[in-house]
Image (tube, helix red, strand yellow):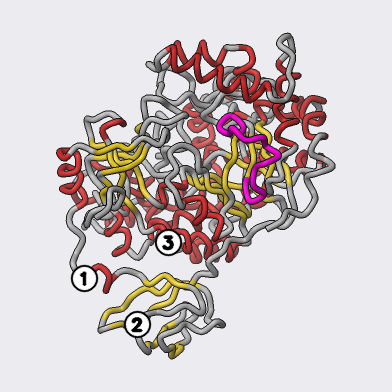
Amino acid sequence: MTATQADAWGLQQDWVDADDRPQRVADETIKRLREVIGRPPEDLDERRPVVTRPGRRLGLGPVTVVCEDGTERQVGDVLPEDFPLGYHRVQVGGRDRLLVVSPGRCAVPTEQRWGWTVQLYGARSRRSWGIGDLGDLRTLREWTERLGGGFLLVNPLHAVAPTLPQETSPYLPATRRFRNPVYLRVEDVPGFDPALLSGHEADLAALRSGGPVDRDGAWALKRRVLRAVFEARSGADEDEQRWRAEVGGPLEEWGAWCALADEHGPDSRAWPDDVRGPDAPGVAAYVAAHRADVDFHVWLQWLVDRQLRDAAGDLTVLQDLPIGVSGAGADAWAWQDVLAAGVSVGAPPDLLNSSGQDWGSPPLVPWRLQLAEYAPFIQSVRSTISGAGGLRIDHVMGLFRLWWVPEGEGPTEGAYVRYPAEDLLDIVALESHRAGAVVVGEDLGTVEPGVREALAERGILSYKVLWFEDEDPADWPPQAMAAVTTHDLPTVAGLWSGTDVDEQLATTDMAEEDVRSGRKDLLARLARGGLDEDAGPDEAVASAYAQLAAAPSLLLSVALEDAVSEERRPNVPGTVERDNWCIPLPVPLEDLVEDPRPARLVEMFADGARGSVPE
């Protein structure tokens, strides 16, 4: 085994950090993580799914394939070039195995486009109930289309537990398969009656009064009104019934988990033994006794699905796929045998955070994921990609290897665990192909050699960020999404004014020297645009995006925070002493769409953002 190879458990004891320095994980950490992972079975290669492409050698000999449409095909050792893409079954050596046939390449637009990056919860209108909703997303989409934009990139919309308090981080959902009903525009729900708001005028006024996003207040009022609408309706119509049948078991499972969470609390690890898993003996009886409660949560998903599709229209809306889920949530409840206990995922120290990061999500055990036929991954990708035409994979390096942090240890005491990247990437390509969806891989931080090449081979766009790059944007690759900043990095105005540094020093334990040095580096990147020292924040924003406009990258992303010179970034990693993920835009949407600053900002993209992009 060479210095950077993984052992039989997938652990990589030797690795190279973001500064190209070799590192070695302590033997005790390796031993502890081996116990968590467990030794893979000796016959894993004979049981795991076969993931391939048409025209490739199967290595299985002549076999009968039962295609997903129910037809059978006899194939030899090489899969025919015309073999249908999809998820099939094959009998090999008496074993029934999943056969995934992928095109090997994602759907990629052929013309350059610009679009907005949107933290939807903070994009509030005067109509919304204190939190940006899917009606507001529709407004943003229509405005984007009028300005000539080609996409929106939104924060993860995945669901959290239906209880209070609501989880604030979009990157720690209860599930990656279903969406958060807090984003519903209640007035657009069939059957809504304004009379249902009688007696709640003060609550609604408080939500609309400004200040940080109040998810608890918004969800409490929305849930109360939505439940009243649900109880007054006559039942599901044909479209809803058809959709419910199509989504099937996972949807019913989600409804059951939500109903159980309402009764027993949001942490399913603390529930009574007889309901501590979807197949536990008491779950079926509970569902039968609480049918209306389960159906209510299922109905909410139907509403979200329809409102999202309406909001997206024909515009590409890239939805963000978090790297993991809450260990207490619905996906962890459903797949507890696939998840690792006693560890969480994160990142070693890098440019984003000199102390490293712990994101709090339990990782999937690679060999158990294979024996689960990749179902947790497939369902998460498919559900996130549906209905809007695009996908951004957070920390895409996690498809290759993930930084596991043992419980009770800091992020610097972790180790990398390798994943079956070739299979996972081809699954992404298959889901992208079926949905006609562009895919972006967020490849910031510690990126090992070969990752970006593997992404490019499959048409997964890289993620180029001005604050991270030494090269001039004009020299960035075409096959990328280009941005100035991200939700975890300073806004242009916050960087320029110095308030972002003040906030980091006040809310994190990062060393002052590191914080100030980081600002100096970013200011140097900003200064490449020829910015005067006495320039104002709007001029700083214009300078940064003038640099971005020179990039040949396929997608050019403009942060809405920058469009209105907001100084606060959505999230400061490494702190809970701040309103992370609760900061609204400083103007309501009605004023935003009339504000001349965003329109002027995107004028610089008008000439170049419709041309064809070379392969």
Query: What residue type is disc 2 on?
Result: Leu
Q: Where is residue 365 in the image (x, y as percent from the top left)?
A: 28, 53
Query: What residue type is disc 1 on?
Result: Asp
Q: Where is residue 62 in the image (x, y as percent from the top left)?
A: 37, 89
User: Rounded to the nearest whole Å, what is the CA distance between mark 3 and mark 2?
Assistant: 18 Å
Q: Is residue 27 left or right of residue 323?
A: left
Front one among 496 and 221: 496
Asked if residue 454 is positioned above or below residue 170 in the image, the reply reads: below
Residue position marked by numbered label 3 in the rendering: 422
Q: In which quarter of the image is the N terminus?
A: bottom left
The segment highlighted magenta reads: 466-480
**What is the secondary structure assignment of the residue under circle 1?**
loop
Q: Is residue 546 left or right of residue 428?
A: right
Q: In this view, does 290 lie to the left or right of 493?
A: left
Front one among 97 and 610: 610
Residue position marked by numbered label 1 in the rendering: 43
Query: What residue type is disc 3 on?
Result: Glu
Residue position marked by numbered label 2 in the rendering: 60
User: Rounded to the nearest whole Å, what is the CA distance between mark 3 and mark 1?
Assistant: 20 Å
Q: Mark 1 or mark 2: which comes first in sequence? A: 1
Determine whether label 3 and label 1 are within 8 Å by CB. Answer: no
Q: Quadrant of residue 573?
A: top left
